[in-house]
Image (spheres, rainbow, N blue to C red):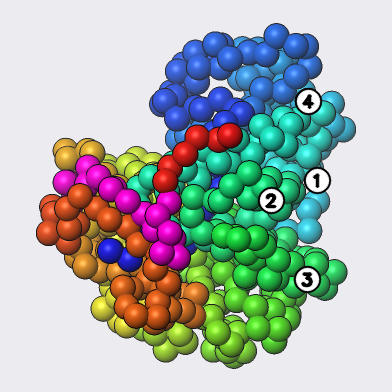
């Protein structure tokens, strides 16, 4: 088959998180969280303990870091939420950083504060960076971080991927890719989209524009990413109507005129944009803007996530030519089948019924790419594609499907990771298919996945992968 392409991956920070911080994925209660952390406490006084994949549903209300202080006095803890859009930290750590009350950020990021001061919940990227950039703990050597990146890329490639879109390019991303290519070739192609900070100005845009085209043998910078809203669980997504707590109805970019100017800046320079837009308010804004300014030559603009939209927005993707990027595993693995998850409690069951409308978007003529959002989602594309067909976790047969009417056929699912990514890159006819003149990026499965049940697809062995006609072997870091 054509090689599979995952159009939404965070390979650098994802691999470093997985390789150098504590996984909290197994903690489904506060008691279990305490047990996991107890076995990982640093021996060096003052050294920060980082964790990732924290399930915010274990908190009865808004997350708080005060229990960390109670459990582990004197230990600075920094725990990243499963959606990677907030931190739960020890309040004393904030105090040590001089954060004793509310802070103002250029975007809608915030540090949660109550009558007693900061609670330890740090929401959205600008606020998170204020904390994470202050860590004075010894950093891993570049070669060690490169090993983690190599391991992450090999893990992704093992499921049949021949290319990914990396939606991050922070330091030391370039140095890591260059280090890997110093000793060999990357196990797959990487198309990089640097993040444009919310409410940023012309200087940041020019820096990102100057990065376009740099790269190596199998990686290159070709596009940019915007964050127009946040997440439903945090109350920072942008829906047309507020949620049950009066939140989730404002953009992350406070100055929408500035966002319009940024989109126009990159479009006029022929640079593709990808916009994170979860709520229907954010999605509608991007669609309206693209209808106004058009696309960059060569590659269409794209909207990522699209977690809940009404009927009125479905046809507008085909009308405007905007590519729809979606992660069905967020519906099948981050939502509770019984609706007990934080997203549903806040956004509501009516909008949940309009959630992750993959089949409806295709029926209305949209170009749909299916991706993982790794490490937030499952990186193995065979699992993600099976979930997209079942609308439940393929390994949880007792789970009720979420919005079964949005299930994809096997042909639609695999097209969403082959021919559709080629269209999203403006490379239809040049990749994503087996044809004379197309890039020979291929995957050989043991069995034809189009003839297998969804349940069998995750176990369909990858026998070989080819990139530009060259067979790629999985190898250990040298």
The magenta segment is 454-472
Upstream in sequence: badge 3 or badge 4: 4
Upstream in sequence: badge 2 or badge 4: 4
Where 257 sits versus 447, above or below?
A: below
Of discs 3 and 4, which sits in the foreground?
3
Q: Quadrant of residue 397?
A: top left
Q: Mark 4 — residue?
A: 137
Asked if the residue under mark 1 is in contact with the one under mark 3, i.e. CB atoms within 8 Å, the reply is no
For mark 2, give the secondary structure: helix
Asked if the residue under mark 4 is in contact with the one under mark 1, i.e. CB atoms within 8 Å, the reply is no
Q: Residue at x 13, y 54 (%)?
A: 452
Q: Does residue 267 belong to the magenta stretch?
A: no
Q: Residue at x 56, y 11 (%)?
A: 38
Relative horizontal placement of residue 130, taking residue 184 as reference (left or right)? right
Q: Residue at x 25, y 68 (%)?
A: 412
Q: Which of the image's four quarters has the C terminus?
A: top right
Relative horizontal placement of residue 95, taking residue 13 as reference (left or right)? right
- Cα separation between marks 3 and 1: 32 Å
- Cα separation between marks 1 and 2: 37 Å
Front residue of 81 and 394: 394
User: Mark 1: few, some, or many residues within 10 Å (few <14, many ≥20)?
Assistant: few
User: Mark 3: few, some, or many residues within 10 Å (few <14, many ≥20)?
Assistant: few
Q: Mark 3 — residue?
A: 210
Upstream in sequence: badge 2 or badge 3: 2
Q: Quadrant of residue 337?
A: top left
- Cα separation between marks 2 and 3: 18 Å
Q: Position of residue 249 (x, y in %)?
A: 56, 62
Q: Which label is found at residue 103?
A: 1
Q: Mark 2 — residue?
A: 178
């Amino acid at each position: 088959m054509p090689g599979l392409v995952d159009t939404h991956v965070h390979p650098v920070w994802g691999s470093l998180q997985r390789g150098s911080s504590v996984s909290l994925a197994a903690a489904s209660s506060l008691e279990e969280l305490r047990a996991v952390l107890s076995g990982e406490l640093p021996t060096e006084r003052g050294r920060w303990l980082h964790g990732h994949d924290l399930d915010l549903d274990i908190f009865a209300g808004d997350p708080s870091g005060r229990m960390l202080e109670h459990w582990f006095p004197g230990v600075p803890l920094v725990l990243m939420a499963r959606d990677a859009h907030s931190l739960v930290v020890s309040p004393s750590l904030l105090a040590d950083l001089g954060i004793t009350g509310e802070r103002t950020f250029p975007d809608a990021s915030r540090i949660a504060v109550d009558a007693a001061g900061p609670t330890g919940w740090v929401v959205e990227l600008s606020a998170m960076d204020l904390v994470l950039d202050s860590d004075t703990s010894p950093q891993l050597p570049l070669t060690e971080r490169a090993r983690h990146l190599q391991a992450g890329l090999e893990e992704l490639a093992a499921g049949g991927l021949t290319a990914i879109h990396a939606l991050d390019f922070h330091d030391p991303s370039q140095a890591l890719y260059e280090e890997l290519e110093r000793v060999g070739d990357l196990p797959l192609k990487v198309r990089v989209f640097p993040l444009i900070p919310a409410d940023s100005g012309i200087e940041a845009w020019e820096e990102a524009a100057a990065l376009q085209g740099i790269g190596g043998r199998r990686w290159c910078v070709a596009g940019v990413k915007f964050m127009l809203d946040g997440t439903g669980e945090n109350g920072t997504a942008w829906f047309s109507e507020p949620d049950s707590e009066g939140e989730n109805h404002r953009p992350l970019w406070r100055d929408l005129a500035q966002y319009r100017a940024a989109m126009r800046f990159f479009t006029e320079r022929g640079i593709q944009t990808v916009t994170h837009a979860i709520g229907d308010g954010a999605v509608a804004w991007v669609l309206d803007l693209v209808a106004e300014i058009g696309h960059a030559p060569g590659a269409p603009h794209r909207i990522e996530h699209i977690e809940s939209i009404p009927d009125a927005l479905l046809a507008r993707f085909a009308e405007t030519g905007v590519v729809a990027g979606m992660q069905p595993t967020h519906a099948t693995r981050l939502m509770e089948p019984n609706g007990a998850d934080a997203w549903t409690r806040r956004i509501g069951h009516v909008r949940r019924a309009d959630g992750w409308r993959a089949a409806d978007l295709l029926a209305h003529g949209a170009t749909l790419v299916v991706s993982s959002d790794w490490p937030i989602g499952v990186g193995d594309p065979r699992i993600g594609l099976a979930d997209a067909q079942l609308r439940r976790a393929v390994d949880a047969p007792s789970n009720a499907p979420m919005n079964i009417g949005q299930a994809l056929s096997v042909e639609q699912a695999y097209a969403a990771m082959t021919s559709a990514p080629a269209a999203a890159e403006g490379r239809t006819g040049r990749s994503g298919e087996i044809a004379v003149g197309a890039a020979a990026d291929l995957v050989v499965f043991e069995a034809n996945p189009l003839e297998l049940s969804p349940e069998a697809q995750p176990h369909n062995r990858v026998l070989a992968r080819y990139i530009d006609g060259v067979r790629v072997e999985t190898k250990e870091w040298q």
